[in-house]
Image (cartoon, grey):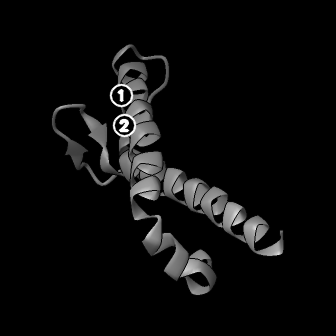
């Protein structure tokens, strides 16, 4: 939905979207990997496909979840600023 209405602005602000998405995503990947390795929490093998990011040993489902969540939040904030600027 975000891309339907604001794709042109998101493309213009692609650097902001990229940095705003990648920085928290990398942080969340690292923290989640640490938590999993310290057995703070665990993920069931039954509900994962078995693929992982090798360096972090982070299941692909977790990695994609954090990436997409960060992307949607950042796009929402960028588009909010765009809408407010258009109304001002």
Position in image of residue 80 (x %, y %): 71, 63
Q: The N terminus is located in which quarter?
A: bottom right
Observer able to see residue 37: yes
Query: Is residue 76 found left or right of 22 in the rendered image?
Result: right
Q: Residue furthest bottom?
A: 4
Residue closest to the eye, 55 or 73: 73
Q: Position of residue 62 (x, y in %)?
A: 41, 45
Callout 2 touching callout 1 (CB < 8 Å): yes
User: Is the residue marked by circle 1 packed among few (<14), some (14-19), or many (20+) residues within 10 Å?
Assistant: some
Q: Which mark is residue 52?
A: none
Residue extending farthest right: 88
Whether residue 35 sits left or right of residue 87 in the image: it is left
Is residue 46 in view from this perspective? Answer: no
In this orientation, which residue lies closer to the viewer: 72 or 12?
Answer: 12
**Looking at the picture, how far across and down is residue 20, in whole percent?**
47, 47
- How many neighbours does mark 2 have within 10 angstroms: few (below 14), some (14-19), or many (20 or more)? some
**Which residue is farthest left?**
54
Residue at left 45%, top 71%? 12
- Which residue lies at the image location 22% right of the left edge and 42% below the top edge? 53
In the depicted structure, whether residue 54 falls above or below residue 15: above
- Marks 2/1: CA–CA distance: 6 Å
Foreground disc of the pair 2, 1: 2
* Disc marking residue 30: 1
Which quadrant of the structure image shows residue 18? bottom left
- On the image, the x and y values in percent for residue 85 come to 74, 67
| Residue at 61%, 60% in the rendered image | 78
Residue 33 occupies quadrant:
top left
Q: How many circles with numbers are drawn on the protein? A: 2
Find disc 2 in the rendering and name its residue: 26
What element does badge 2 sit on?
A: helix
């Amino acid at each position: 939905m975000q891309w339907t209405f604001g794709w042109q602005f998101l493309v213009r602000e692609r650097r902001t979207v990229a940095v705003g998405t990648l920085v928290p995503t990398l942080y969340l990947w690292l923290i989640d990997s640490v938590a999993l390795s310290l057995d703070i929490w665990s993920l069931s093998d039954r509900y994962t496909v078995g693929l992982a990011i090798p360096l972090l040993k982070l299941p692909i489902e977790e990695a994609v979840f954090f990436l997409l969540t960060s992307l949607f939040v950042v796009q929402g904030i960028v588009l909010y600023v765009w809408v407010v600027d258009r109304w001002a």
